[in-house]
């Protein structure tokens, strides 16, 4: 876990601190599949700005995840650009003015980074945007072997049978 101690940073209002940090990312479970960050340690930039009433934290990096394509189960790699922002009020009155990642004067950078990536994941992780997926009839990869099964569509009795099957 990557922690960043705020004790090393003393800022006055208006002052800003930037530091390159290494963020450790876990594997992500998504849609029943597993996506592994490559590399696990991602170079990131942490920016801390002191305002009059609190502190603004910004974290930016790009995570690269490897895992199976949602459609064809082939290898997929996904770049997830992150620009996350958190705010901690000096004298917080509500939970909305605090960040859950600041604990005992330390910023839990890895937890924050993990949550930010999880929130930024698309609905489907694909090997390429136009992935043709697997054939629903025979299960072959339609990217490698584009084909259609004519008879299934051509014969209306198949459609009737399919409908019957769906109702059972
Ligand atoms: Zn695919
Ligand atoms: Zn097929």
Image (cartoon, rainbow, N blue to C red):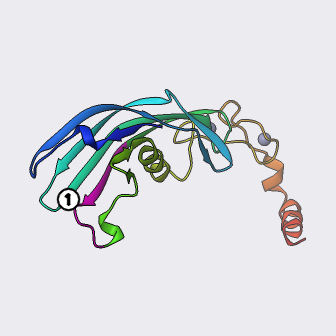
**46 or 92, which lies in front?**
92
Secondary structure mostly taken by the magenta-highlighted segment of the chain: strand
- x, y percent for residue 131: 59, 40
> What's the residue at 89%, 69% (across, down)?
164
Report the number of numbered marks: 1
Q: Residue furthest top?
A: 39
- x, y percent for residue 76: 58, 34
Q: Is residue 84 magenta?
A: yes
- x, y percent for residue 24: 47, 34
| Ligand 1 visible in quadrant | top right
> What's the residue at 84%, 67% (across, down)?
166
Q: Quadrant of residue 92?
A: bottom left
Residue underneath mark 1: 54
Q: Quadrant of the C terminus?
A: bottom right
Q: Is residue 148 left or right of residue 97?
A: right
> What's the residue at 57%, 41% (across, down)?
126
- x, y percent for residue 144: 68, 30
Picture layout, residue 100 above or below residue 81: below
Q: Quadrant of residue 74?
A: top right
**75 or 4, which lies in front?**
4
Q: Is residue 155 magenta?
A: no
**25 or 150, which lies in front?**
25
* Span of residues in magenta: 82-93
> What's the residue at 51%, 42% (across, down)?
129
Q: Quadrant of residue 106?
A: top left
Q: Is residue 85 left or right of residue 135?
A: left
């Amino acid at each position: 876990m990557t922690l960043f101690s705020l004790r090393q940073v003393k800022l006055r209002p208006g002052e800003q601190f930037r530091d390159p940090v290494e963020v450790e990312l876990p594997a992500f479970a998504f849609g029943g599949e597993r996506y592994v960050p490559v590399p696990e340690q991602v170079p990131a930039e942490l920016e801390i700005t002191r305002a009059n009433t609190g502190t603004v934290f910004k974290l930016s990096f790009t995570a690269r995840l490897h895992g199976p394509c949602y459609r064809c189960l082939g290898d997929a790699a996904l770049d997830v650009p992150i620009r996350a922002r958190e705010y901690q009020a000096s004298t917080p009155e509500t939970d909305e003015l605090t960040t859950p990642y600041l604990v005992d004067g330390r910023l839990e950078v890895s937890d924050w980074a993990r949550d930010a990536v999880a929130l930024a994941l698309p609905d489907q992780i694909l090997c390429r945007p136009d992935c043709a997926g697997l054939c629903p009839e025979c299960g072959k990869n339609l990217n490698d072997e584009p084909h259609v099964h004519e008879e299934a569509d051509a014969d209306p009795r198949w459609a009737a049978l399919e409908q019957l099957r769906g109702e059972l």
